Amino acid sequence: MTDLKIAIIGAGSPYTPELIEGLARFKDELPVREIALMDVDERRLEIMLGFCRRFAEHLGLKVVFKATTDRREAILGAEFINAQIRVGGNAARVLDEKIPLKYGVIGQETTGAGGFMKALRTIPVMLDIARDVENYSSDAWIINYTNPTGLVAEAVSKYTGAKIAGLCAGGMRPRLRVAKALGVDPEKVRYDYIGLNHMNFAFNFTVDGRPLTQEEFDRAAGAVETVDAELVRKLKLMPSSYMQYYFHTSRKLKDFQQSRHTRGEQVLMLEKEIFEAYSDPQRHTKPEALEKRGGGGYSEVALGVMRAIHNDEDKWMVVNVPNKGALKILPDDAVIETGCLINRSGIKPLAIGEVPPAVWGLICAVKNYEQLAVEAAVKGDKDLALFALMAHPLVRDYDIAKPLLEELLEANKKYLPQFFKNDA
Ligand code: G6P
C-alpha cells in the first residue's frame, strides 16, 4: 500500500481541522504522507497551516503539510482532492439570504433563490478546479462539500472528465436517527433514499433486514424537528430537514423576515471567534465555537468515501452521483442523492424500485430547476437563469423572478464574469 497525498482546496475553511481529525482517526486505513492546503486567502491559509500542524501533532498524525495558493501545485499527484470553497465568502451568502426576502421569497444558502445565486458564482470555479484535476491528476477523485453540492456534482460530471463524489452529511442522518431511537448499531440500518441534495426522503427502513414498525419509524422520524410530525407519519417518508422550506414555506418566510440576523451573519460572527482561536500559537485542540457551525459529520462522510475507494471496500453510502437509470423519473445525466455502492471501481447508484407518489412531482420540479441553473451558470445565459428561477417551486412567478434575477446578478457582478462578458 502506497502512502497518499491529499489536497484540500479551500483549506482556509474552518472545517479543515475536522478533516484532519478524521485522517488521524483512520490513519492506518488511509496512510496519508502529505496534505496540501490550498486557498486564495493567504491570511487564513497561514493560520490554518499553523493550527493544522499543532493539531496533527497533538493527534499523533505524522504527515507533511504544505500550504500553497497555487491550485495546480496542490492537485499534482494527489489521490483525493477535497473541495470546500465559498466563492465570495459569507459576505456573498448574506446577500443570497437577504435579497430574495425583499421579493417575498426564501433566501437560503442551498435552497431557492439563494442557492441558485450561490450556484451561479460557484460552478465556473468548480469547473476550473475539475479541469485542473483532469489535467494534473486524472485518476484522482474530487471529494466535494462545496454547496450547492448536487448542482456542483452535476456541472462537473457533465462538463469535465473528472471523477466527483458530491457529499452531504444529510444522507447518513436517517441512519443515525434510527440507530439512536432504537439503540442499534448504525451499520445495521438500511433504507431506500430518493431525491436530490436537500430535497430527499428516506423510507423502507430495515434493521438487520427486519422492517421497522410504524411506531419505530415515528420515533426515529420525530427527530426531524423542522417538518410537522403528523405529516411525516402520514407520508411514511423521513424527509431531509430542508423540506421545511417546501412544506412550511409561508411560516419559514415569516421566520426569516422577522429574524435579526441571517444565518450567514451569524456564521460571520462565529468565524471571527473560530479564527481567533486557531491563531493562538498555544492552541492545539478544536475551539468550542466550531460546534455551533453546521456541517458536522462531513469528515466522517468524506473519510468513509475515501476509505471505500482506496481500500476497495464495497461500502453503502448516500452520495450525489449521476442517475444512470437508477431513478426512472429523472434523466440519466441528472445528479441524484441516493444510496450507492462504493469501491475502487467507483460510486454506483443502486436502483430505486419504488417512487413515492406524494413527492415525485416536487423532486422532478426541483431537478428541472437545477438543470437549468447549471446550464445558466456554465453559459452565462440570462434567459436560462430566468427559466431556472421560474422552474423553482419556491420562486415560480415571472413577475417576481425577473426583478429578483436582475438584482441578484447586479449584486454579484464581480463574481459572474460569464454574465458580464461585454463589460469592460
Ligand atoms: C449543513 C448543511 C450544509 C451547510 C452546513 C454549514 O451541513 O447541510 O448545506 O453548508 O451545514 O452550515 P452553516 O450554516 O453553519 O454555514
Image (tube, rainbow, N blue to C red):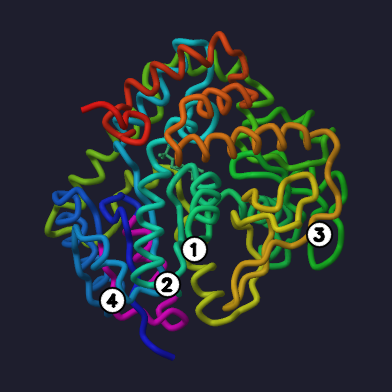
User: Is residue 141 toward the left or the right of residue 312 in the image?
Assistant: left
Q: Position of residue 58 (x, y in %)?
A: 25, 71
* Residue 36 on the magenta span: yes
Q: As shown in the figure, which amino acid type bears the numbered disc 2?
A: Ser
The circle drawn on residue 376 is none
Q: As shown in the figure, which amino acid type bears the numbered disc 3?
A: Thr
Which residue corresponds to mark 4? 34
Question: Earlier along the polypeptide chain: callout 4 or callout 2?
Answer: 4
Q: Quadrant of the C terminus?
A: top left
Which residue corresponds to mark 2? 138
Question: Earlier along the polypeptide chain: callout 1 or callout 4?
Answer: 4
Question: Earlier along the polypeptide chain: callout 3 or callout 4?
Answer: 4
Q: Marks 1/4: CA distance?
A: 25 Å
Which residue corresponds to mark 3? 206
Q: Position of residue 417 (x, y in %)?
A: 31, 35
The answer to whether mark 1 and mark 4 are in CB contact below 8 A is no
User: Is residue 48 toward the left or the right of residue 341 in the image?
Assistant: left
Which residue corresponds to mark 1? 161
The answer to whether mark 2 and mark 1 are in CB contact below 8 A is yes
Splitting the image into 4 quarters, where does residue 77 fall? bottom left
The answer to whether mark 4 and mark 2 are in CB contact below 8 A is no
Question: Earlier along the polypeptide chain: callout 3 or callout 2?
Answer: 2
Segment tinted magenta in the rendering = 16-37
Query: Does the beta carbon of the residue at mark 3 sit less than 8 Å from ligand 1?
Result: no
